[in-house]
Image (cartoon, grey):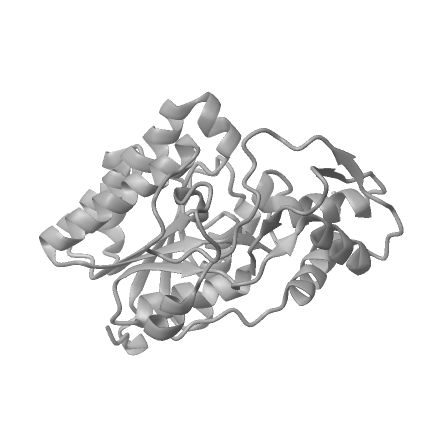
Amino acid sequence: MHIDLMTKVTVLVTGGAGFIGSHIADRLISEGYRVVIVDDLSSGMLKNVNPKASFYQVDLRDYKAIEEVFDKEKPTIINHHAAQVDVTKSVSDPATDAHINIIGGINLLKSACEHGVRRFIYASTAAVYGDPEYVPIDEDHPIKPLSAYGISKNTFEKYLELEASRVGMQYVILRYANVFGPRQVPHGEGGVVAVFANRMLAGEPCRIFGNGSKTRDYVYVQDVVEANILAMQSEACGVFNIGTEKETTDREVFDTVRAAVGSSQEPIYADERPGEIRRSCFDATKAKTKLGWKAKISFAEGVARAVEFYRRNKQ
């Protein structure tokens, strides 16, 4: 789908006050798009909202409020990043997780279909794959989520595929590896760079669970933004892994953050947490061939940028 910026295409970004969504909104505005942000501010922050965007504090579970936004703003593209993303909370309270990630998503999808939205971009997650049967993980890997969060994200993928097919709406599902960078809040496994950076800057110790050999695929937020822009402007549809195709160990994360901070501390090792996935790394070949995307920012460079952000914004 070719986007003519002269027509001021309107993009509705859910979760646009959050970590990834706010970076996407900034980029869209810089490229001349008209941006509408919907966020309930349960985890997002007003300070992340670009002042050039139209902002609505709306919970996606409130269908009437969503419809009012669509009636007024008439978006033609949806970029859906709003979600309950705390895996631990999803385990202890799966009902709330499902209400936000599934019911809220269905409400958004219903409005998108009824209002003739042309293209729907959905942020999914590596959590849908569960414990990898092989590495690197491609899009054909079995779906075996180990958490209610992974189940909820994959469930909405299925609703999106079904409804998009029914009404002829184009869609892209982006399954993210571990995204990191400025504005990320320091909690959760995916936020380990933020956790380590903030603790080191405060002179506090950092804990590694296990012996430090567990791996993840860490992708910098601006590379993720680029994937969203390409997905929005492309004719391609379907599911795409967004990752660097590189494994980084917990100890390498610690060492890289320590170097960027200029710290000399050593990590504290703790018992490995039950159910931890030992290795995770994405095969992003499909994103390269179909979207023309690949990660460009190295882990070390991304960490340096993130640490500088946290240094400037110390609480």
Image quarter for residue 8? bottom left
- Whether residue 68 is visible to the viewer of this picture, yes or no, is no
Provide residue 246's location: percent of width, then percent of height. Answer: 57, 62
Is the residue 294 above or below the residue 73 in the image? below
Answer above or below: position of 182 versus 288.
above
The image quarter containing residue 211 is: top right
- Does the rendering let one see residue 187? yes
Q: Residue at x 43, y 55 (%)?
A: 137
Disc tally is: 0
Q: Is residue 11 or residue 242 the one in the foreground?
A: 242
Where is residue 32 drawn, in percent x and y? Answer: 39, 72
The C terminus is located in which quarter? top right
37 w.r.t. 297: above or below: above
Question: Does residue 68 appear to the left or right of 23 in the view shown?
Answer: left
Quarter that holds the N terminus: bottom left
Residue at image point 77% right, 40% down: 206
Find residue 86 and report its horizontal and vertical position in percent.
50, 35
Q: Position of residue 128 (x, y in %)?
A: 39, 43
Left or right, 238 with reference to 192: left
Q: Residue furthest right?
A: 264
Depth check: 59 or 132 in front? Answer: 132
Q: Viewed as shown, does residue 258 lie left or right of 77? A: right
